[in-house]
Amino acid sequence: MTDFDRAQLLRSVLYVPCDRPRAVSKSETLAADAVIFDLEDAVAPGAKAEARETVRTHFSAFPASEKVRVIRINALSTPWGTEDLLAARAAVPDAILVPKVDDVADVLAVTDALNETDAPKTMRLWAMIETPRGVLNAPAIADLAGRPDARLDCLVVGTNDLAKEAGMAGATARQHLHPLLMQIVLAAKAGGIAILDGVFNDHLDQAGFAAECRQGAEMGFDGKTLIHPSQIAPANAAFAPAAEEIERAERLVAAFASEDNAGKGVITFEGSMAELLHLKQAERLLARAAAAARRERSESP
Ligand code: COA
Ligand code: MG
């Protein structure tokens, strides 16, 4: 996979609890764009050491992968954090996901630890925004992306923790989370990094899941974090541009390229105004569509 594909495609990002070796090895066969090998909240305290060992074994067996592979460690302030970090560093995933990031210092502590071990610069950091303080500090955290030594590439929203920490409960929690989610999306866009939506807990409710994916895509998320393999295909579909969107973008690009519109910054396109920013948006959409098509070709037998 090229760096370009990685940057473009994070539609489906599956959490795999590392105390389930069968799920860990199965993850390589699934069509998720990315996998998060979880050592944190999906693993009970008594199973942490065993989960770490499973990750080690898995990365030794599969030193390379078509997927973006991420290891979620426990926070450095917990009894497991340091050992998780060392195990993750040794496995050399594409990124380490830092949980419960409250502020810039929580990210930089992991950055420093990685830099001290001379970890390759290709090993990146992702940060979970899932505490009230993390949401309030999201703009500063996302701005770390402007510092190449900080390694930060992506924010991941932890909706379950956030709803709990913010004191929201019940079926309507997502509705109340909306203003917070939009703040995080905005922070990620301002920092120029990827942003992933939280999980949908009821993996048997396919219609509810599809609706939440569509909503996440409309809100500006690049993709959704997932808990079950059955959620991969619908997420891939929801976060890839639709056929009509692709056709419209192609027409818009062609309109700007036409002789009549040569050198123009604003044109009339199908009855509406289109500016250069719309051209850029269309080009980005076509790049994502091309990456999705390439991924599908590489996965079809
Ligand atoms: N990653 C990889 N494989 C998974 C998986 C996952 N997250 N969830 C389920 N599977 C696999 C199972 O191993 C099983 O494979 P098999 O038939 O080859 O044995 C198959 O998919 C069907 O699983 P199913 O029986 O439907 O699910 P379950 O009842 O075993 O597990 C959950 C349901 C929700 C407990 C499980 O999906 C899970 O642990 N998800 C991740 C939770 C998590 O990481 N949370 C933390 C972040 S929010
Ligand atoms: Mg969490």
Image (spheres, grey):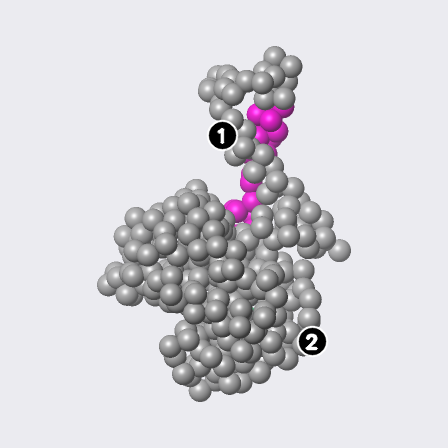
Looking at the rendered structure, the secondary structure element under dot 2 is helix
Q: CA distance from mark 1 to mark 2?
A: 45 Å
* Main SS, magenta residues: helix
Queried whether the magenta region covers residue 250, the answer comes back as: yes
Looking at the rendered structure, the secondary structure element under dot 1 is helix
Residue 29: quarter of image: bottom right
First-in-chain label (1 vs 2): 2
- Can see residue 30? yes
Give coordinates of residue 235: x percent, y percent: 52, 52
As rendered, which of 48 and 235 lies closer to the eye? 48
As rendered, which of 107 and 164 lies closer to the eye? 107
| Label 1 sits on residue | 277
Residue drawn at 43 percent across, 69 percent down: 109
Residue drawn at 55 percent across, 53 percent down: 10
Which residue type carries mark 1? Leu
| Mark sitting on residue 61 | 2
Q: Quadrant of the N terminus?
A: bottom right
Residue that extends furthest to the right in the rendered view of this protein: 301
As rendered, which of 85 and 65 lies closer to the eye? 85
Residue drawn at 27 percent across, 52 percent down: 176
Give coordinates of residue 81: x percent, y percent: 44, 78
| Mark sitting on residue 227 | none
Q: Is residue 12 above or below residue 241?
A: below
How many labels were placed on the picture?
2
Residue 132: quarter of image: bottom left
Which residue type carries mark 2? Ala
Q: Which residues are magenta?
A: 235-254
Instruction: Give the class, few, some or many, for how many residues have Cα within 10 Å of label 2's Cα (few <14, many ≥20).
Output: few
Q: Is residue 246 above or below residue 172?
A: above
Give coordinates of residue 295: x percent, y percent: 67, 50
Q: Is residue 71 above or below residue 240?
A: below
Queried whether the magenta region covers residue 18, the answer comes back as: no
